[in-house]
Image (spheres, rainbow, N blue to C red):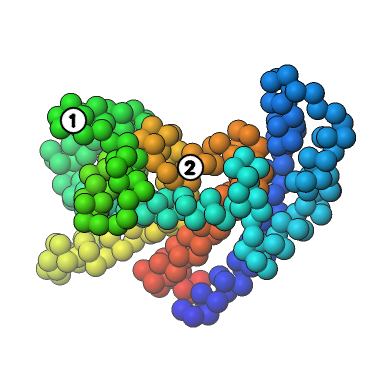
Amino acid sequence: MLQFAFRRLIILIPFLIGISIVTFLVIQLPPGSYVDSYVNNLRMTGNIVSADQVANIEAQYGLDKSLLEQYTIWIRNIVSAGDFGNSFRYNRPVVAILFERVPGTIILSLSAIALTWLLAVPLGIVSAVRQYSVWDHALTFVSLIGLAVPGFLLALGLMFLVYQSTGWLVNGFFSPPFRVAPWSIERVVDLLKNVWLPIVVLTFAGLPTIARILRATLLDELNKQYVTTARAKGLKESRMIMRYPLRIAINPLLSTVGWMLPAVVGGEIVVSKVLNLPTIGPVLLEASLVQDMYLAGAIVLILSVLTVAGTFISDLLLALNDPRIRME
């Protein structure tokens, strides 16, 4: 097992280098640059910007250098000092912006992922074991609704219902009086009154897919001969399902851990805009629109590293769950 994990770690090193190169190239793909957008905005307001001024602005932000020089400086600063550069849009260090937004994003995403798995796995098992029952049809109906209803629409609907029922307007993680207040029991209660709604929305978005995948794979395993043999030997049904077919049926879900966190972060962009949540999604959207290359590049790089780290965790979970993978 240790050799398996070590081999995977060795593979990750050149892969991370390749990801950093691709990330830097991707954020350079849109035509123009932040300086072009900045100068165009100045000209639209009636200001006259000369070519020398444009050159000075490009030199200020380091955009007068070649792509190779820009990448070398960018990645060297990240590796040596954890410096992702300065945000053009906010005129602040990118690290400071990330420290403000990343903790809330991680808490929200991990909470949604944990709740999704806690609900989806039992529902998928019940749906497969009780095929064509009321529970199975109910899960199918809920799955279709979850796949059809956009997250932002569900968020708006829940906001309206909560406001109509209680008069409480969910707007951000905290209500206005508690946003800059020190931590206290009242502030924690206020957080719980607000944070449950985005967690429910993000959970409802991922739950149908996981439950349906588990149902399909478990149904396939329950029809195999080793299950029939286990039943013929008198093994208790619940113990047999948990010990044999479920371990194999859950492999496709374990392999998706790598993209779950980036998917939640990407999927919460519109939801965060609707609910006014201080997470990383809206910042990525705004940085992309104004071509804030260092801020957008840092976020894309972090999401890519999270994907790679999640894939590594998936490999370890699959190896622990299925000995055949370690043998290969």
**Image x and y of residue 247, in percent:** 31, 63
Q: Earlier in the sequence, mark 2 or mark 1?
A: 1
**Amino acid bearing label 2:** Gly
**Amino acid bearing label 1:** Gly
The local crowd at label 2, few if under 14, some if 14 to 19, many if 20 or more residues have their Cα within 10 Å, is: many
Q: Circle 2 sits on which residue?
A: 281
Residue nearest the observer in this picture, 84 or 229: 84
Res 304 seen here: no
Contact between marks 2 and 1 (CB within 8 A): the answer is: no
Q: Real-space Cα distance between discs 2 and 1? A: 28 Å
In the image, residue 206 above or below residue 232: above
- From the viewer's perspective, is 74 left or right of 67? left
Query: Residue at 15% across / 41% down in the picture?
Result: 135
Query: Residue at 70% across / 37% down in the picture?
Result: 34
What mark, if any, has residue 167 been given in the picture?
Answer: 1
**Image x and y of residue 15, in percent:** 64, 61
Res 236 seen here: yes
Residue nearest the observer in this picture, 265 or 251: 265
In the image, residue 34 above or below residue 241: above
- The answer to which image quadrant residue 172 occupies is top left
Query: Residue at 54% across / 42% down in the picture?
Result: 284
**Image x and y of residue 40, in percent:** 73, 25
